[in-house]
Image (cartoon, rainbow, N blue to C red):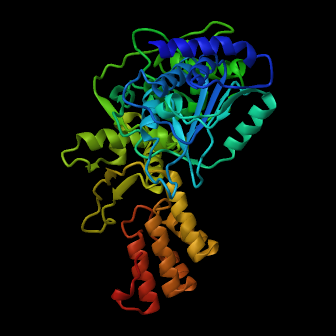
Amino acid sequence: MLRPLIIGALYAFFTPFLYSGEAALIPAGGYSAVAEREIEGARETVSLALYLFNVPPERASEPGRLLEALIRARRRGVGVEVLLDGGESPFDPLDRNRSAAERLAQGGVDAAYVDGKILHAKVLVVDRKTLLLGSSNWTTAAFRSNVEADVLIRSTTAARAFLDRLAALPRRVPPAVNAGKPLAVPAGFLFPPGKMGEMERRKDAGAFDLYLHFLKQGVSTSTFSPVDVPGAVAALGEKDEGPVANRRRLHRIFRRLNSFYGLAEFQEVYGKDPAVRLSPLSSSETVRLPLDYFAGGWDRRLSLPGKVFLLLNLYYADRSPAAPRWSLSRETLADRHGLTRWTVGLGSVDLRRHNLLEVDYDDQPTPDRPQRRPNAYRPAPFYDPAALEARLRALGEKHGPEALARARRRARFLYEDADARTVERLILLENRYGREVLERAAALLGRQQPDNPKRNVSYLAGVARGLAGRPASDDPAP
């Protein structure tokens, strides 16, 4: 009981000195109280960079209270950025920050890990003008027993300089942060009179993304909820341009979600953040969308047809007698969901290119069997795009950037752009048979239709092997 009172008294005594100069030392035992007060007073942004953020199970702990303060700031519209060390130090390889990243994600705050470097900084930046930095990690030991040294600095110049340094750091999504309960997307959104098909016809990716964002935020169908304006702008992949510009930009999409699609109602008052209520849809069924869709940035990477087919893929994979394998013709999918065959084709190709969809094509028609069976599909799991790029970079360092570029071009021709094993196999094929032979093999394969089952790396390897006059056992594999 005495400890909170002592810390509170220290903070009350110390506050006048904090504001009287450019910088001031935080008293022993007072760090968490100062950090929480600064976060609670944030109006625009909070940026946090930490080597170690260790949150005990009990929420009454100091790290737990600070985590909850970050979540509250996010919910009241403050832009919150959390950057953590990835735990890849050769001295300590454990994923030490995973629990904090998971609990932040559950509260709507996405954390990222620094990629390829050790993040040893312990810095909190509030509203781009206040820094709290020093030796303290966000751990119970740092707050209660360690001897630490931390200062509070009020300097716009210093704050912006540090934020520029943070922005330049490469980052990746923490592994398994979003392995919990998936987002439940109403199945009625997929079927007419649901509006997914109409959004695609209008090329209205903004309305699509914002509707899924509101579902992710848990917006109710019965009561109005304040719109997290910076979060909504971020969900659209747009730059934060300040409250007025952000609200103006969102207003146009709000009108479409309300008037064109009937999916949401909004309360808008000039000069204030709006409120939103989602419209209930008739079907009680849902599509289970893994939260890694957001954490991995797939809401930004996929085209609108790709996002549309992703929801169809997840819906039918869950309900197929051969689950997760399912099969329907393009015509059937287009008719059921108010789409065009062109959209269905583009969406499936986009997912296949990103290695998020496995497709089995029936053989080409023959005079004896002129009708092909519909394609069979199977969802592939989300993955960390940064890890894929790191693996591809390693291939470039090993085999040379020109060889990597040629292999990636051929992989794209095979719709396997994001399959590092295919890219590596194509490099080895060129090393074995030569660039000219592989170009000739690709040209022959290019005569096949895009949905020909022979348009794959194994068939390409067989053609190259035949052109080179090599035995079947000669085919290299990674």
State the residue lying farthest toward the top: 269
Residue 110: x, y in percent? 51, 34
Any part of residue 441 in sight: no
Q: Is residue 447 found left or right of 246 in the rendered image?
A: left
Any part of residue 62 in sight: yes
In this rendered view, identify the residue nearer to me: 159 or 330.
159
Q: Is residue 431 found left or right of 383 in the rendered image?
A: right
Q: Is residue 69 found left or right of 324 in the rendered image?
A: right
Q: Quadrant of residue 283?
A: top left
In this rendered view, identify the residue nearer to me: 454 or 141.
141
Vertical placement of residue 461 versus 93, above or below: below
Residue 88: x, y in percent? 50, 54
Residue 412: x, y in percent? 52, 63
Residue 290: x, y in percent? 38, 38
In this rendered view, identify the residue nearer to me: 197 or 174.
174
Vertical placement of residue 64 versus 269, above or below: below
Residue name at image x 56 percent, y 31 percent: 235
